[in-house]
Amino acid sequence: MLGFLTARQSGLDDPLRLRRAESTRRVLSLKLNPDRDVDRIHGNGINTIDIEAVEGRYMLSGGSDGVIVIYDLENYNGKPQYTCRAVCTVGSSFDKTMKVWDTETLKPAEVFEFEGNVYSHHLSPIARKHSLIAVGTKNPKIQLCDLKSGSRIHVLQGHRAEVLSVQWSPRYEHILATASADSKVKVWDVRRASGSLFTLDQHNGDKSKASSEAVNTAHNGRVNGLCFTGDGLYLLTTGTDDRMRLWNSATGENTLVNYGKVCNESRKRLQFTVSRGCSPEFVFVPCGSSVAVYTLHTGELVTMLRGHYNSVDCCEFHPDYQELYSGGKDCNILAWVPVLHTLDVEEESNKGAAGQSSVNPAFQDAWSSDED
């Protein structure tokens, strides 16, 4: 780290390299923070967590108890020990509707009704030419709801079972990925009227490895998790076959990265996340009562974050501080925070002189300014 600081100070290196190296170090030192609590509001398991992207100050959680909670993550007392307080709670329910809430009045501004239970919905984080919300329900048809008109304007047909997860690309505003209980993952361009762009195939078209019934399946079981990488170049999927796969989002090719067994017993949507600003990037996946941390492109299991008393169903990465929040059936939201420490100057100097390092290889920054 001192080498990065010296190079930056002397103008010999790009400041972004220091930022990426420090972000990587912080992710690799994530520990359960005993000084930071999150108000325990939910009376049942926590299904989803999200952090608002503008200030990174507020966190939302949704639970099986039909309650949505908004938390303030800011520390106001200036002490290491503090609690992320619940700002407000909103009553919701599993009532076959999707509601758009006015954050000023905390009242529904729009209500969309569906024939089946709603399992997943997502609004594009980058869209400028549309304001579509993709909705996955018990019905195999994906619904596109327009915030401007307040109506359902389009239906995407192709799946044969309930749609468990939907995700817009963070790179192209018209690209949508959907995962279903029919073992398939489809990628759509919502501007096209003629079906999906492609269906992910775990065997990359090798018919000798797939039975006739399993052609173009992403997993050998329900696919209940989707997550794009921050740059949108790759797509991760998880399934009840205890596998996680990494795909090229442009071609649909299975990159064949082996993550080993990724325990997945959930029959509903599983929320997992990818780090941002690190080199290499890391994947955080609920795995039983723990959160497994993998290196994205090698599949190496880096560590297991243990602290929950029951199954973990969701986790969310905070890119501003390289922190992680996880929620589970124990009704708790846990904060995983980097352990800050000072590197020994003499040890750092010796590493530079020897040209070797005994630290985790992920500390060795792999980014260069030539990359896109």
Image: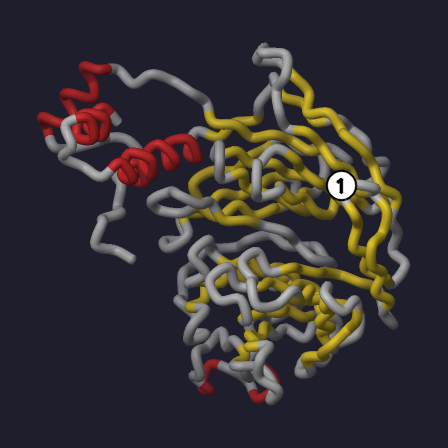
Question: How many badges with numbers are in the image?
Answer: 1
* Front position in the image: 230 or 145: 145
- Displayed quadrant of residue 146: bottom right
Residue 243 visible, this angle: no
Q: Return the x and y of residue 175 as percentages of the image width and height.
A: 54, 71
**Quick one: SS at disc 1?**
loop
* Front position in the image: 42 or 152: 152
Disc 1 crowd rating (10 Å Cα; few below 14, some 14-19, many 20+) is many
Q: Return the x and y of residue 71 as percentages of the image width and height.
A: 71, 32
* Left-right relation of 82 to 152: left
Q: Please give the name of the residue rendered at 77% of the width and 30% of the height, measured from the top-left corner.
A: 87
Residue denoted by label 1: 329
Q: Return the x and y of residue 144 as percentages of the image width and height.
A: 71, 71
| Quadrant into which the N terminus falls | top left
- Displayed quadrant of residue 158: bottom right
Residue 125 visible, this angle: yes
* Left-right relation of 181 to 64: left
Type of the residue with mark 1: Lys
